[in-house]
Amino acid sequence: MPAVVQFGLPRLAGSEMPELSYYLMLFAALAAAVTALGYSRTPFFERRPIICLALGLGLWVVGMGNAIANSDTERNLISTYVYFVSYGLPLLYAAVVTPDEPTTASRRLVDVVLLALLAILCYLGVRDLKDEHGFLMSAYEPWVALAFDAENAILFLVFLVRTLAATDEREYRSFKVVTVFLGIYALTAALHNHVDPGEASRAIAAVMDTLPVLSFSSLICLLHGHRRPAAFDPARRLGMRHLAAGFAPGVLLAAIFAFSVGIRGSKSLAGQLVLALAMLMYVIRVVQTQFWLAATRDRLVKALATVERMSLLDVLTGIPNRRAFELALGERLRESVRDGKPVSALMIDVDLFKRFNDSRGHLDGDEALAAVARLLAGSLRRPADFIARYGGEEFVVLLPHTADDGAQVVARRMNRSVYDAALTFELGIDQRVTVSIGIATTDELDGEDLMRRADVALYRAKAEGRNGCRADAGRPVAPLP
């Protein structure tokens, strides 16, 4: 359609319109910028890349307007090329800011200052290419066209990586739209800048003149066509995400050096100062990232420690759970063997607890278990003593550096503590909640055998009438007076 207008409108008007292709590109880019800005305010796309796309297109529109204003000279001011190059700076920012970086106000300020310094570096780097009237000298036009090609190709590649590294569907759609647009724009701009229609027909020349319009029209269609979510699988993108996080700092550093090429050998104090400031902003940006990563690491370590601690606690009773007990058992046995002292284990069971649940209900049963856990834990005297909920109505206690006679004292104390608390249970022994305890002692590393013997002793205590303690392969333990 743009080619038809470019070719047909002058024929209908009966006069040459050399600036018509410029106006077509200007209005197409402006329409694309407005469309992108409008979609940035909707939930269809991720806000940052679409806003940066709109800003970049805005700079492109300014550059084209500058070119139209000087179209009668058949040459462009240096400032026009600076605008065309600067259109890629907001896009570069969108590509290098990953979800793995901080997004604080101070970070955004540093990024804005750095992008502004890059634009200044761009101008300072090409100002020596202008003549006395401020226009780009003809000898440098092919090199500037190649620089545009390199910029477009780099933008396409970094956005392609970000598209492949997307972590959610909305981010993927946003970067995909910009990536496809940048690919089309890079191709059409290269054909427009390097292919000379020569003696070809005016129709072909019209097509070549308006090729960039195709990219802006495609962008509008892409934005409209990608409003709805589609299937997305982030699990396969972890490697690309690592790549995106890794190359982002390098892309910014490469941009600083690329834009400073024209002033590195210059004696211009302003150029050297801007370059130094740009490097300083880059260093500040890296330091901000390192501080943020260190703080994030510390928070993660703290959160993981909390999760680990919570995973070792029984939610109902607040004491350690069976997993914590199994970890503690191996640790206590190794310590005792190393020190040459025995370890005792107590297996504790709440008597007739199934009958309690059936008669009183599970809510009252949970309250009774929590109360028993508090009473048992309160009966321990040493920090090294360990109690855990073994499962259901069973508890287990580890007593390091404790022989059989010492374990019996602790068991009697626990048994009496629960009995004296007089937790009401109409169908229980003496109409209260009681516990039975089995005791076993070892000086070896065989934790499985220790717990088996404690369990056997527990069942003997229950078989002998409950509310008592039984030592492994011994007589019933006498209650406390």
Image (spheres, helix red, strand yellow):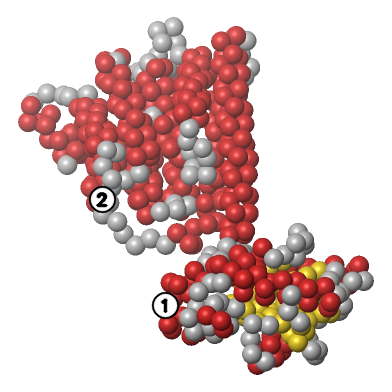
Closer to the chain start, of discs 2 and 1, is 2
Instruction: Residue lying at the far front in this picture: please name it.
Output: 481
Which amino acid, mark 2?
A: Arg
- Residue 227: assigned label: 2
Examine the rendered structure and indicate whether residue 459 appears above or below residue 166: below
Q: Tell me the SS state at disc 1.
A: loop
Q: Residue 361, labelled with which disc?
A: 1
The residue sitting at 22% across, 24% down in the picture is 19
Decide if residue 356 is on the left or right side of residue 458. Answer: left
Q: Circle 1: is it few (<14), some (14-19), or many (20+) Cα within 10 Å?
A: few
Q: How far apart are the two marked residues, 2 and 1, measured between alpha carbons?
A: 54 Å
> How far across and down, in percent of the image, does residue 271 sit?
57, 14
Judge whether 461 appears above or below 47 on screen: below
Residue 394 or 126: which is nearer the viewer?
394
Q: Work out which quarter of the rendered image holds the N terminus and state it.
A: top left
Residue 78 as seen in the image, left or right of residue 67: right
How far across and how far down the image is residue 347, in percent?
A: 69, 79
Amino acid under disc 1 = Gly
**Quadrant of the frame with the C terminus:** bottom right
Say which of marks 2 and 1 sits in front: 1
Viewer-proximal residue, 217 or 105? 105
**Which element type, helix, strand or loop, lies under badge 2?**
loop
- Residue 418's disc is none
- Looking at the picture, how far across and down is residue 468, in whole percent? 68, 83
